[in-house]
Image (tube, rainbow, N blue to C red):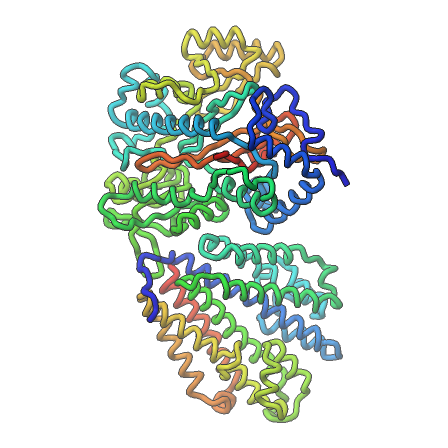
Amino acid sequence: MSETVSASKHLIARHAGSALWLARYMERIENLARLLDVTKTFAGDAEGGRNWLSLLRINGDQAAFFAKHAAPEAASVAQFYLLDAENPTSVRTSIRYARENARTLRALISTEMWLQINVLHGAICGLSVADIEPEELSGVCAVLKEGVQAHTGITEGTLYRDQCWHFYMMGRHLERADQITRLIDTKFNALLPPAATDAAIDAGEWNALLRAAAGYHAYRREYPHGYVPREVAGFLLLNTTFPRSAGLSLAQLDWHLTTLRSRYNLRGCTPAMGRLDNLQSMLSSQTVDDILGRGLSPFLDWMQRELGALHEDIMTGLCGG
Amino acid sequence: MRQDGVLAEYDPGDLFCEMLRPGQPPHPALSQLCDRLRHLPIDALRRRAADAERDLLERGITFTVYSDATAIDRILPFDLIPRVITAEEWHTLEAGVIQRVRALNLFLHDVYHERKILADGVVPRELILGNAAYCQAMIGFDPPCGTYVHVCGTDIIRDDAGRFMVLEDNARTPSGVAYVVENRHMTLRVLSDLMAGLHVRGVDEYGLRLHRAMTEIAPAGLSDPQVVLLSPGIFNSAYFEHVFLAREMGVPLVEGEDLLVENDRVWMRTTAGLAPVHTIYRRLNDDFLDPDVFRPDSHLGVRGLMEAWRRGAVSIANAVGTGVADDKAVYAYMPRIIRYYLGEDAILPNVDTRICAEAEGLAYTLAHLHELVVKPVAESGGYGLLIGPHASKAELAEFRDRLKADPANYISQPMIQLSVSPTLCDAGVKARHIDLRPFAVTGRDTWVLPGGLTRVALRPGSLVVNSSQGGGSKDTWVLA
């Protein structure tokens, strides 16, 4: 069976927290790049302003945005999310914190990981207003997505899979689960026509939603007949073969916590495991119809709160607070 | 496009050049290297230097400059043309460094125990016991293996006649060793053809040797002691080196907040709870180590660490209070300290230093003031330095009065023209002054990393090699 793990290979609690944060910040960059790209692509029509606004709502950034900009449109939103060092949800801020955490972890992560983050940081900090003009935006988003995907690949191939890796992976799945619930929440409110859950809706909008989650083609293969809101919601929330579904992220979190608990004997896992257990059974014991019937939005709000609390459980129980 | 070889227009003048070695019999490896440099077009060298610089930037091999708030990270410039030390030269340097480290450790043990050297009048009592770096908490304490200076960086220069001499001992927390290894890796990446077949000694052993020494000094009776590296954190100017050393030793890189003292033992906060720590290689100054004993406002250190150390629950490297041995004034006594403890002459001489506290030294200094460098030795040193050859008559006269008023506060040294090495500059390959800092690691015994950090003053004529003042570094090749 598996190799025995040297008990002497301790992980400093603070480093565990940095690994988790590193993954979260990198995931955020990819998520934001996807959203910007998709919004740009599908915002060309008269409803463009509404699409940019919904992007701000996903991150709860309306107040911060309108304090600086008059109207949500490609140029102002791109500037807010790509260049604004004061905006805590911007790509600029995320890469700065990602690099800072990587620097803290520099003795544990691979040189390739550090090098790539360092170069990506340089590229992002070097972006100017001219670089992110609306016609350039897709190209910039592609660079960001590829940057994070390169990071993900390098991490997969080079990060030693001891405790540090498990914490890193928990950060990734916490972030993905959180992001998908935000995406569904905002888009479903915007997409669902009043009092008509299964009515025909603009295919282009569903298209954009699924592309933002990197799930468009998978969804088409799974449901070739067309868009049905309950099926889209079920796919994004519950389908554990879809890499960014909430269900798969929770299952991955479960595996990492269980491994840390059993192989490394980390007793501090217990509160997080209890909460995750509850979260998973709330998700898996319901059909998508149950969830929609009881109200999608309250359910997603509850999930986001629980994911936040789960993050805190992990931090408090294992990462020194 | 310049097809001239790297050495085509190089002219070191009367200075001692480490590459051309005027007046020395030709050395086969050096001749071969010079030959390769003559056949390497200067533009090709520039291209490779650009590759190296980009590589350093991408790898984030930087040091921190606090004065610039917008860009805290700077690269230590790397000059591709290596500095070469022959096997014979290294033999002497290595023996000289080991001898010096032995004497430093014996001296420290003595001044914190019997104080025989003070009783015998070899070193003035007040100079040691009144020294700001003399640590009361160290009196009577016996560090494992009798070692105080586990890592020593000895600054060595070479004069215009090619004589090696020690400029300074760094016995506290000397830095720079990471650059030694990274510079070698850079050479291998961008200029390995220059090195091929010359039998240059490797530098990759450092982490293993350091870890072994840290294991040797750990409290007795442990089969697998836990070593950690204690850093002030990611904003420290030497953080890159702390990372490097933690990686090379395979030990956790911790900060003060990760450690605590409980039940007379030292622990680190891990994901599994508290885990014991046995040896701390600290890259934190004495003052910050333990707020109970030193600066109470320090958040970088660990409360109760000194007491745990004194009780033998943990070992700390370097020991606290070693600064009393690398003080400018004590430096002047090093040749006598070596003779006192080892009954040998110093293998590596000091720069010819006069101690103005002594009548003879004062008389000589006063008579030759216009050709000497006179340094105050007080802890607040650095200020009030006289460079005789550059001083006006009025300045000399004024300094003469100051010197007579407080001779014990001064030492004097001749102006040394440091040796030079060909260095790639904007205007071509020029002679630039260099020094050398070998690193000695001591647990039970002393081991010296072959070579060391060669720093180069990149400004024309400058003798200042410090990175903060436009200095760079070179790969140092010790021939086998």
**Residue at the image point whose x is 63% and y is 72% from the top:** A35
Q: Height in image: B284 above or below A250?
A: above
| View extreme (left): residue | B221
Q: Height in image: A52 above or below B8?
A: below
Question: Which image quadrant: the N terminus of chain B?
Answer: top right
Whether residue B121 is visible, yes or no, is: yes
Left or right: where does residue B407 sit relative to residue A45?
Answer: left
Q: Position of residue B133 (x, y in %)?
A: 38, 29
Q: Height in image: B191 above or below B159?
A: below
Q: Quadrant of residue B40?
A: top right
Left or right: where does residue A217 sit relative to residue B152?
Answer: right
Q: Position of residue A180 (x, y in %)?
A: 54, 76
Q: Position of residue B388 (x, y in %)?
A: 57, 14
Q: Height in image: B158 above or below B44?
A: above
In front of the other: A306 or B381: B381
Q: Position of residue A3 (x, y in %)?
A: 34, 66
Whether residue A86 is visible, yes or no, is: no
Left or right: where does residue A72 sit relative to residue B178?
Answer: right
Left or right: where does residue A58 sit relative to residue B46?
Answer: left
**Residue at the image point whose x is 50% and y is 70% from the top:** A175
